[in-house]
Amino acid sequence: MLMNKPEPRIIIAVDGFSSCGKSTMAKALARNIGYIYIDSGAMYRAVTLYCLDHGLIDGDTVDTDTLRSLMDDIQIDFRPDPETGMTHTFLNGIDVEREIRSMRVSDKVSPVSAIPFVRTAMVAAQQKMGGRKGIVMDGRDIGTTVFPHAELKIFVTASAETRAQRRVDELRAKGIDVDFDEVVANINKRDHIDQTRKESPLRKADDAIELDNSHMTIAEQDAWLMTRYKETVKKLR
């Protein structure tokens, strides 16, 4: 009697531009297929918050010498919120999920995340998290640097205006009032820094599948992702 082979567990890398909804779709996919979700961007935001709170950023200049000496003091982990079940980011034992989503952090995260030793530390932590597979991770360089051999790679894009409006809606829903033009400017600035930095610049991996979700509903993109996932595991059986 033939036994059905168990479904292979894979690594799913979701990369793309800021405010494309990568985290939302990655969380939904992980939940739907029973995988662990890891928000790599939240890790860089947590380091940025640490820098801001410790006076290590002046304008767009980061005190890299001091930050390098303090990297071992920065501990980042993810824990489920007991009320909502949603994953929250903890920095040195403190829940910083709300703070890391603020414009204060968004405006400084790109220069911090471009620092080579910061990326090296975060990539090492992310690769350790993905050791057992069965994960969905989103970020800027997951399919190119963190998990270049991921079985499924998605690259997400959308227009800057669409992304800005989504970001505004998200922040206002959390009670944070922001200016649309300010958010557009922040997104364009982050795009430029992310794509031109020397260390792991944002780019589509050669074997990634592109998803432009500018005009897609959340339900449509979730269905699209599920189809790509099923196609991938079917090939691996």
Image (tube, helix red, strand yellow):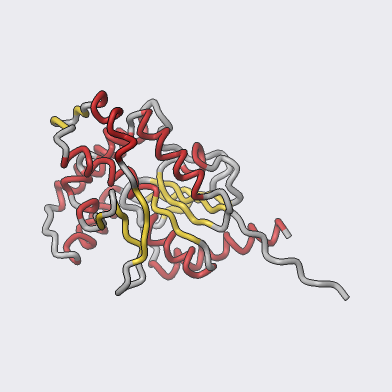
Q: Specify whether 6 is left or right of 169.
A: right
Find the residue positioned furthest to the top.
65
Name which residue lies at 70% across and 57% down: 235
From the viewer's perspective, tell me whether residue 178 is left or right of residue 109. Answer: left
Tell me if residue 114 comes above or below residue 105 in the rendering: above
Residue at image coords 24%, 55%: 96
Vertical comparison of 180 with 35: above or below:
above
Q: Position of residue 220 (x, y in %)?
A: 45, 67
Q: Position of residue 195 (x, y in %)?
A: 37, 34
* Viewer-nearest residue: 92 or 126: 92
Q: Quadrant of the C terminus?
A: bottom right
Q: Let me know if residue 103 appears in the view.
A: yes
Kindly tell me whether residue 192 is visible in this rendering. Answer: no
Give the left or right position of residue 165, taking residue 136 as reference: left
Q: Residue at x 19, y 48 (%)?
A: 183
Quadrant for the N terminus in the image: bottom right
